[in-house]
Amino acid sequence: MLALLCFSVLALAPAHASSTRYCDDPPPLTAEQKDKLFRFGAVIKDELQASGHGLAFIARSGLDLGRFGVRYSHAGLSLKGGLATPWAVRQLYYACEEQRPRVFDQGISGFLLGLDDPAIGYISVVFVPPAQAEALQRRLLDPRQALALLGATYSANAHAFSLQYQNCNQWVAEMLAVAWGGLGGAGSSLPPASSEALASAEPAVPALAPSLATPTAVASPDLRAQAQAWLKAQGYRPRDFELGWSPLVWLTSLSRWLHHDDHPLEDQRQAVFRVSMPESIEAFVRATVPGATRMEFCHRGPRVVVRRGWAPLPEGCVPEAGDTVVMLD
């Protein structure tokens, strides 16, 4: 069994304090639930194909972070070409059995199987103009670059400007920085490319094959530091999780996936975690890349709602004026 997770602050809630629960297999989906998710994925893939773009930043409503006002928990980069399947998502996950982070590829349908609720789910997609997309795609498909940004130790609530840990969204943010900041170019000191053949998951299979990372892959702290410095200089703002007095903070010491020692002392005193999340990356792209556009998708019951623009879809997946509704039944 290969179990994976990304951001899981809620794992620390008193009702979910088990340090192993989040490496257990999720409850199985019914055939009907899988069928709807696959048809939802087909709608998204059709829109990606019709967009005229070759790369998309994609995020899903993974774990339920509604108590923090957060809809999206996990992000990756979807490519029209270059991976095993069209629009596969390259992303970082924590591989529970190996107890370390790795880079994985996953088809759109498999990506959707990570939605926290099979009855309702949200997907956000951001496109950037060709120049930025091409620069990012070149770095993303270069094993040296992708692995040089893969931190050695995973933490779901990793501080956005620390090299000590890394979460899945931070890897994406640092990849943007390397591509758009012109970092790690020719002559830079990077780990050798993996000799392992690239592999990727079948689109409808939740278990993933590692696409890049090998036991000998070594991150480049220097490149990660440059990426974080560039993000900070460009005004990147991670998401602030203000927990106040809460057993959540104390319970970080009981989980192998959450930590607080990488956060500044003042933040620890105030119980604030500053973490890279999909919304912080989207806000950064919107503010710094002229011409960036966004689509949002949700499914509930027999319908899919598609919205173009930066205004978020309402809770409950309720269509409003200007939205497109696609019936699945």
Image (cartoon, grey):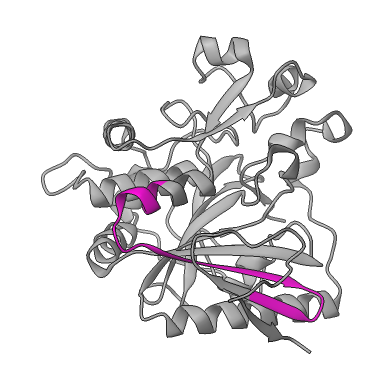
Question: What residue occupies the far left of the structure in this picture?
Answer: 187
Residue 255, above or below 95: above
Closest to the observer, 243 or 171: 243
Does residue 257 sit above or below 113 in this rendering?
Answer: above
Magenta segment: does it hold 321? no
Q: Residue 225 in the image: state x and y as whole percent.
A: 31, 30
- The residue under the point 70% across, 66% down is 113
Q: Quadrant of the N terminus?
A: bottom right
Q: Residue at x 84, y 79 (%)?
A: 31
x, y percent for residue 253: 69, 19
Which range of residues does the magenta coloring cover? Answer: 284-305
Q: Position of residue 157 (x, y in %)?
A: 59, 32
* Residue under the point 46% across and 41% down: 170
- Farthest residue to the front: give it: 321
Instruction: State whether residue 215 appears in this view.
Output: no
Q: How many marks?
A: 0
- Foreground residue, 329 or 21? 329
* Residue 230 visible in image: yes
Identify the image quadrant of the C terminus.
bottom right
Left of 139 or right of it: where is 67?
right
Q: Residue at x 62, y 48 (%)?
A: 73
| Residue 247 in which image quadrant | top right
Instruction: Where is residue 168? Give x, y as percent.
Output: 52, 46
**Horizontal placement of 104 versus 147: left or right?**
right
